Amino acid sequence: MIRSLLLLSLAIAAPAAAQRKPPLVLAAASLQESMNAAADAWAKQGHPRPVVSFAASSALARQIEAGGAADLFVSADQEWMDALAAKRLIVASSRVTFLGNRLVVVAAKGNPVRIPVRPPAALARVLAAGPLAMADAPVPAGRYAEAALRSLGVWSAVAPKIVRGDSVRAALTLVERGAAPLGIVYATDARASSNVRIAGVFPARSHPPITYPVARLAASRNPEGEGFRRFLISRPGKAIFAGYGFTPR
């Protein structure tokens, strides 16, 4: 009798769990390894594993603006989240900034170059030798990089030698494949690659703070999305990202 009841309860519970829909998360390209690790950890708690789509924050925001369905958006800057907020495409009360990052110059593993941040002439001489890989201008990493180069007084010298990638990971790939000797990416991107090394770190004050906000989309009706958002901003969630080099906020 007890065995029959147990089997019946399992038969009822299994379809209920199967019916839960996994949330769709649109996340900045720089979060690939860490967000997948967070999704795995969430799934181990008995939830359907989130489906995560990675791209430049700019591309993801435009996808949302065009009516693309999703539950959460994680941006690599505040501006693209602001753009969605202005159009009431996110739930304002769900928006939380939970991670930070650093901006660095990377070189191929065997390249011994060191980047002198100051004086400007020395920095310009190294970077302007080119090509210098960077993310496209609308992409957060591209914006941070341009702001840093302008702040340090070398933008005009370096700009003609820049080659662009459609995301920060695309810029990283250009260095990994030898298409550019140097690239500007996030510190976490450099850490994720075994083929590059950090050749220099930009002063934090040379560019706007690199922050990652997360928010639930206004069109989302999946409770699993809100549950995963809360996990991401929790202490255990942030600890996962810290393990990949992000700074919890």
Image (cartoon, rainbow, N blue to C red):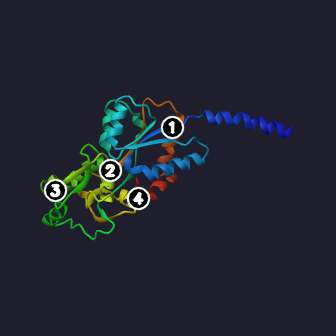
Q: Residue at x 73, y 35 (%)?
A: 11
Q: Earlier in the sequence, mark 3 or mark 4?
A: 3
Residue 43: percent from the left, percent from the top? Answer: 57, 46
**Count of numbered marks:** 4
Q: Which numbered disc, 1 or 3, marks the residue closer to the eye?
A: 3
Residue 50: percent from the left, percent from the top? Answer: 51, 41
- Left or right: where 102 falls relative to 206: right
Is there a contact, CB below 8 Å, between mark 2 and mark 3? no
Residue 192: mark in rendering: 4
Q: Which numbered disc, 2 or 3, marks the residue closer to the eye?
A: 2
The vertical placement of 153 against 219, above or below, is below
Look at mark 3 in the image and give the residue it sits on: 158
Q: Does dot 1 land on a helix, a strand or a loop? A: loop
> Farthest bottom residue?
112
Q: CA distance from mark 4 to mark 1?
A: 25 Å
Look at mark 2 in the image and give the residue it sits on: 170
- Left or right: where 179 falls relative to 154: right
Residue 23: mark in rendering: 1
Residue 197: percent from the left, percent from the top? Answer: 33, 65
